[in-house]
Amino acid sequence: MNRHVIHTPRSLLRSWGFWLVCGCLVGGSASGLPAADKVPAAKVATVADAMKELNLLTLPVVKGAEEPVNRTVGSISYNAKADLKTAFEFHQQQLLKAKWSELPGSAVTDQYASGTFSHNGFLASLAASPAGEPGQVNVSLRLHGNVDLQKLPLPGNLKAVYVGPQVAMYSSEESVEKTVAASHKLLQEKGWIPYGKAGDVQFFRQNAVILTANISAAPAQMGKTMLSFSAEQISAEIPAPTENVQLQYSDSTKEVLFDTKQSEDDIEKFYRDTLAKQGWKATTEKPFSIDWKHGLIFLNEAKDMLELEMYEVKDEGVLRVTVRHYTKAERDLIEAELKKALEAKKNKPMPKLGTVKIPFPAGAQSTETTEKNLEFTVPTGKGKAAAAAIRKALTDAGWEESVLSADDNLGVIEFKKDELEISLNYVDPGFIPAEITVKGTGVKLEKAKNK
């Protein structure tokens, strides 16, 4: 049986423990240019709309498949012991039986299979390829929302290069700066909200669809400005202020992270006002405090939850803000796990404290050092490597490791030895220093001396 994997970061369990103790947590070819005033007739999809069309959270997978490494509202990806053609046709038939139409251009070879499907304005792409090991195949199925890329508002000076179901590309004689200003203005006028950027790529969100707009100069096109659009369905509709230093959204964790020059009062007011219009209510009149961080919990009528966390980064002069989304089912599971853990440890004597040495990489900057909590930062892009050194030191010392998540941007790893526990978290969004947090239960933590 396949299930939706739910990650439970230690920070969430800590804050939830606070609420449980207090009793406060309740309940494809080139085409002519569309005119600038043409917009999609249908409402841009919400999470509920997408799940109604194709529920990837419960979609059966090929027999012999491993647990999907990625299963969200918008995508599913996994490896299976099957031949490529069988794996592709398994999902192809699922879609066709559900009345999805297969668009022209599908291809199945010994090395790769791909197809695009549509239903009620929604678009889905299916791909399968060898997974590296003999007899294994990787399968990926993605939802791209219900945005017709041909009907996006565009400046009138663009020329279509290629307009297909998944990508729309245009060229312009205007400068990159003018094209960016004109296209972004038109998109925002039609309800597309800026949602972070990376280099030449600007992201926009409307409901539960992220639109990617890439505008840059193309040397191969005689220096012309090139613009391309693509869209992806996401798993949560998390608002964020447009006035931010940088913003990044992770769909695997349903989390928005950004820095801002605004104050905590400004951010609190933004979320209270914005979320109230969407049916969310804060559970407290004032933010709560855990360690040096302040936060708020919001619940909607369905008892889904948004967790707001914010704290000052004084050396950078910014407020760091994180907002995480949890469905009621995810909340119930986490609460059950937490209550079970608390009950198991109730009235149980703690073993004698021992000292565990934690290696810090050269150049690491400590932000907090106590017997039970070590926190430090490393340069951006180095978070996973720093965590790997700590993981090796602990496993070499006989600690049993449990990996909840460990990709380039986010890691949640837990260690056990008898009744002792250590948690290791790292966050490395790619545009600010990576943060490493090590916490101990029943042990004393100490920074190891560099050799």
Image (cartoon, rainbow, N blue to C red):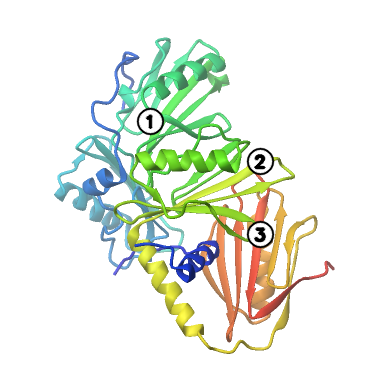
Residue 401 visible:
yes
Residue 410 place in picture, x, y as percent? 56, 56
Q: Earlier in the sequence, mark 2 or mark 1?
A: 1
Task: Quickly name the residue at label 1.
Answer: 167
Q: Residue furthest front?
A: 285
Q: CA distance from mark 3 to mark 1?
A: 38 Å
Residue in the foreground of this view, choosing between 255 and 311: 311
Vertical side of 40 occupied by 306: above or below: below
Q: Earlier in the sequence, mark 3 or mark 2?
A: 2
Residue type at tag 1: Val
Name which residue lies at 63% across and 58% down. 384
Residue in the foreground of this view, choosing between 146 and 422: 422
Task: Quickly name the residue at label 2.
Answer: 318
Residue 137 visible:
no
Side (left or right) of 337 relative to 438: left
Task: Quickly name the residue at label 3.
Answer: 436
Quarter of the image with the C terminus in it: bottom right
Local SS, label 2 = strand
Q: Quadrant of residue 217?
A: top right
Q: Residues within 10 Å of mark 1 (few under 14, many from 20)?
A: some
Q: CA distance from mark 3 to mark 2?
A: 19 Å
